[in-house]
Amino acid sequence: MNVLKKLYGDDIPAPVDVHITRWQADPFSLGAYSYTPVNGRAEQREDLAAPVADRVFFAGEATSSDYPATTHGAYLSGLREARRIQRL
Ligand SMILES: Cc1cc2nc3c(=O)[nH]c(=O)nc-3n(C[C@H](O)[C@H](O)[C@H](O)COP(=O)(O)OP(=O)(O)OC[C@H]3O[C@@H](n4cnc5c(N)ncnc54)[C@H](O)[C@@H]3O)c2cc1C
């Protein structure tokens, strides 16, 4: 409301209802998207993307160094892993 009042003035009405998303608690989401924490390293995304014994491969936005937290990052990481498998 403080921000809205700065934008529209003190006379704006109070909200009739409020809905707050809790992505971490939502059983269908269990989270939102990854972020690099304070003191985190960008290279940690490459660590997440590292295959295990050329048998288990990891895609997903969290493994994308260039476009983390995005759908295109997730999509491109899938292509990256498909290419990796193709080269085996
Ligand atoms: C509110 C919100 C707004 C967003 N807005 C944008 C936007 O405007 N533009 C944009 O580019 N991106 C946006 N994003 C980010 C984008 O949605 C994600 O980066 C993208 O969906 C990640 O895709 P993913 O395949 O890596 O992971 P997800 O889409 O999270 O897919 C992971 C899947 O794995 C499943 N799963 C989890 N654990 C298990 C398990 N143990 N066994 C089996 N399956 C499991 C999950 O149910 C899920 O279906 C937004 C995200 C949120 C939450």
Image (cartoon, helix red, strand yellow):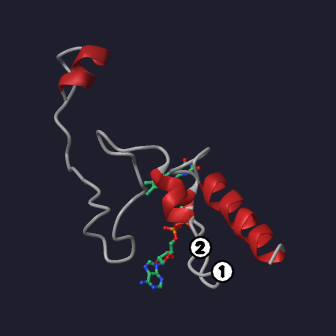
Q: Nearer the viewer, residue 43 or 6?
A: 43
Residue furthest out toward the right: 87
Question: Which quadrant does the C terminus fall into?
Answer: bottom right
Quick check: 81 left or right of 13?
A: right
Q: CA distance from mark 1 to mark 2?
A: 6 Å
What residue appears at the point 35 percent right and 64 percent down from the top-left corner? Answer: 31
Which residue type carries mark 1? Asp
Residue bearing mark 1 = 54
Q: Is mark 2 within 8 Å of ligand 1?
A: no
What residue appears at the point 21 percent right and 50 percent down from the top-left corner? Answer: 18
Give the answer, above or below, for where 59 lies relative to 64.
Answer: below
Q: Is mark 1 within 8 Å of ligand 1?
A: no
* Secondary-structure class at tag 1: loop
Q: Nearer the viewer, residue 13 or 18?
A: 18
Quick check: 45 left or right of 4?
A: right
- Residue 70 image offset from top left, x and y in percent: 56, 51
Which residue type carries mark 2? Pro
Question: Which quadrant does the N terminus fall into?
Answer: top left
* 10 Å crowding of disc 2: few (<14), some (14-19), many (20+): some
Quick check: 56 left or right of 81?
A: left
- Residue 33 image offset from top left, x and y in percent: 43, 56
- Residue 17 image offset from top left, x and y in percent: 20, 50
Question: What is the quadrant of residue 74 in the picture?
Answer: bottom right
Question: What is the quadrant of residue 12 in the picture?
Answer: top left
Give the answer, above or below, for where 27 lies relative to 1.
Answer: below
What residue appears at the point 68 percent right and 61 percent down from the top-left corner? Answer: 75
- Residue 65 image offset from top left, x and y in percent: 57, 48
What residue appears at the point 25 percent right and 15 percent down from the top-left corner? Answer: 6
**Marks 1 & 2, CB-CB < 8 Å contact:** yes
What numbered label is drawn on residue 38? none
Residue bearing mark 2 = 51
